[in-house]
Amino acid sequence: MNIPVAAQIGRKPREGEAIQVTELGPNVSIRVYEGDLAQYHSYSLDFVDKSGQYIRTPKDITLYSGRFGGAQIFSIEGSLRRQRKGSAGFNRSMERLQKGKAAPDPNWETYMVPEGIRIRIKQEGHDDRFLDIPTRGPAVLHPKLMLFRG
């Protein structure tokens, strides 16, 4: 009997979970990890400082799907913030859900990205870089960062 696995979408890596960290600068790296998303053919992604502590997406970094002109990729939390700005009904629903709960961590931000996607990383003062998100199978998690040569 196959029992469905409960996924915690937006969670941070668990102890011992396979992660890949790619440095973008002296105090910021991008971290890719399983994140309970195999059943959705996706990975979790976030930003960390030099100590490995998760941080919000730096203001000078924007992520895009694809090589040229792809759509901007928003974090789960960023998508919710955008939705809150445009919908009073959504705001009321979120307020009801959060009643009595602790305030959210202001540094918590997580992306959900599909397997096999190429992410374009735009960062002020840097050439565009690309991060290839792997597909699952016999290969191990090894995203590769490449410089844009346009």
Image: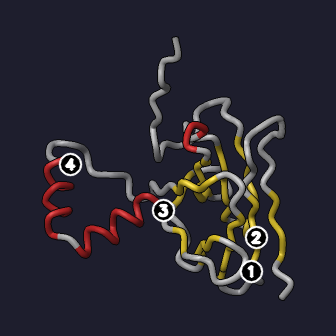
| Quadrant assignment for the C terminus | bottom right
Q: Tell me the kind of residue under disc 2.
A: Phe
Given contact means CB atoms under 8 Å apart, are the residues at marks 2 and 3 in contact? no
Query: Which residue matches tag 3?
Result: 75
To which quarter of the image does residue 116 belong?
bottom right
Front in this rendered view, residue 108 or 78: 78
**In front: label 4 or label 3:** 3
Q: Earlier in the sequence, mark 4 or mark 2?
A: 4
Count residues near mark 2 (Cα–Cα under 10 Å), then give few for <14, some for 14-19, many for 20+.
many
| Residue 90 screen position, x and y as percent | 20, 62
Spatial separation of the CA atoms under disc 4 and disc 3: 19 Å
Spatial separation of the CA atoms under disc 2 and disc 1: 7 Å
Query: Which residue matches tag 1?
Result: 128
To which quarter of the image does residue 118 belong?
bottom right
Given contact means CB atoms under 8 Å apart, are the residues at marks 4 and 3 in contact? no
Front in this rendered view, residue 147 or 68: 68
Which disc is residue 98 wearing?
4
Give the structural element (helix, strand or loop) at label 3: loop
Give the structural element (helix, strand or loop) at label 4: helix
Given contact means CB atoms under 8 Å apart, are the residues at marks 4 and 2 in contact? no
Count residues near mark 4 (Cα–Cα under 10 Å), then give few for <14, some for 14-19, many for 20+.
few
Q: State whether residue 131 is above or below residue 102.
A: below
Q: Tell me the kind of residue under disc 1.
A: Asp
| Residue 61 screen position, x and y as percent | 60, 76
Q: State whether residue 100 is above or below residue 53.
A: above
Which disc is residue 130 wearing?
2
| Residue 69 screen position, x and y as percent | 64, 83
Spatial separation of the CA atoms under disc 4 and disc 1: 38 Å
Front in this rendered view, residue 138 or 8: 138
Give the structural element (helix, strand or loop) at label 1: loop
